[in-house]
């Protein structure tokens, strides 16, 4: 923040943080009770402060994406274990080896979306957003970089996770503690949700999206499932319909696509209005 950004004449909190670091060392100033509350990590991590941490995780990416003029996003969900085509022989199963082509399709799709975004809105609309990890997520961020555009990575702290993939735009690389807040950020600006083959995390993200749309808690947006054969083997949609646990109309909430061009056609022909941060009822 610069002097120009200030909206009040009062001393800025950052100045007090710096001043407090240089106070004389005494029993009083060394005690944790004396720390400024907003600069005290131990205090902020207390159990009682969970509501504040939830609010901060919602607010920080919101403010930074607003400042970056991200008006809408195209979401790419998909498995972290999907290998790059060059690494397909290292995959642990034959199915994963076959799914290496989905990496390339995700990369190509993200490139096409980003090229269109840059031509139509100077890269403000339909910005690619992924979970920021490897596999399909890397492919999405990589495709945006291929087009010379920006992309977002919504990473989360996990015991076995690494840093975000190298193709995420650094200013738009975010890290989360709460899965729920992270998933809200995926959808709050979504103009389309594109789902590639994946595991538990991908299924969770897909079905939360469908549930929100089915129940009217989110506006209709294109939900595109790449690889019909995979998705029909993984989910028995007709069994759900036959059991009566979903309705016929619910099967119209998503479409199967095979190629980047298929997905682009569905997105470009979409007839329902899509607003950016009004996608979720807040």
Image: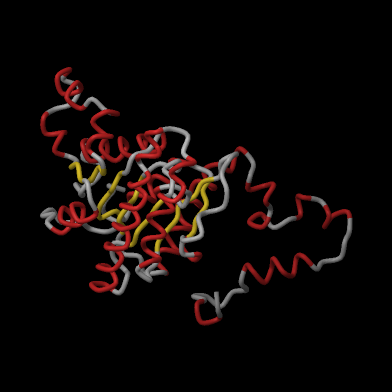
The outermost residue toward the top is 243
Residue with the most extreme front position? 89
At 19% across and 21% down in the image, what residue appears? Answer: 239
| Vertical arrangement, residue 97 with respect to residue 11, above or below | above
- Across and down, in percent, residue 158 comes to 56, 41
Asked whether 109 or 61 is in front, the reply is 109
On screen, residue 81 above or below 15:
above
Question: Residue 141's quadrant in the figure?
Answer: bottom left
What coloring was used for the rendering?
secondary structure
Quarter of the figure with the N terminus: bottom right
Q: Which of the pair 261/218 is nearer the observer?
A: 261
- Count of all numbered marks drawn on residues in the image: 0
The answer to whether 277 appears left or right of 247 in the picture is right
Image position of 177 (left or right of 105): right
- Residue 206 at x, y percent in the picture: 31, 39
Residue 89: x and y in percent read 46, 42
Residue toward you, 153 or 1: 153
The residue at the far right in this view is 26
Identified at 67% across, 47% down, the residue is 43
Q: What is the x, y in percent for residue 97?
A: 40, 39
Residue drawn at 62 percent across, 74 percent down: 11
Q: Residue at x 16, y 20 (%)?
A: 244
Q: Please give left or right for residue 116 compared with residue 89 in the image.
A: left
Residue 48, quarter of picture: top right
């Amino acid at each position: 923040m610069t002097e120009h950004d200030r909206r009040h004449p009062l001393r800025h909190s950052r100045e007090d943080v710096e001043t407090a670091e240089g106070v004389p060392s005494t029993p009083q100033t060394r005690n944790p009770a004396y720390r400024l509350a907003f600069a005290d990590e131990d205090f902020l991590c207390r159990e009682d402060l969970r509501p504040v941490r939830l609010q901060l995780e919602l607010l920080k990416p919101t403010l930074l994406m607003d400042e970056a003029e991200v008006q809408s996003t195209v979401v790419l969900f998909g498995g972290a274990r999907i290998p790059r085509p060059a690494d397909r022989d290292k995959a642990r199963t034959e199915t994963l080896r076959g799914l290496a082509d989905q990496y390339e399709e995700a990369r190509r799709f993200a490139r096409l979306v980003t090229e269109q975004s840059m031509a139509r809105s100077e890269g403000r609309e339909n910005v690619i957003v992924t979970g920021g990890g490897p596999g399909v997520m890397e492919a999405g961020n990589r495709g945006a970089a291929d087009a010379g555009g920006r992309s977002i990575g919504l990473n989360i702290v996990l015991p076995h996770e690494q840093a975000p993939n190298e193709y995420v735009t650094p200013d738009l690389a975010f890290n989360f503690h709460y899965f729920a807040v992270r998933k809200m950020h995926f959808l709050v600006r979504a103009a389309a949700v594109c789902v590639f083959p994946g595991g538990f995390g991908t299924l969770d993200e897909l079905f939360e999206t469908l549930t929100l749309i089915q129940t009217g808690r989110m506006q209709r947006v294109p939900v595109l499932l790449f690889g019909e054969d995979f998705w029909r083997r993984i989910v028995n949609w007709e069994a759900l319909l036959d059991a009566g646990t979903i309705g016929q109309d619910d099967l119209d909430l998503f479409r199967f696509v095979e190629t980047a061009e298929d997905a682009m056609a569905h997105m470009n022909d979409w007839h329902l209005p899509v607003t950016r941060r009004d996608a979720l009822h807040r």
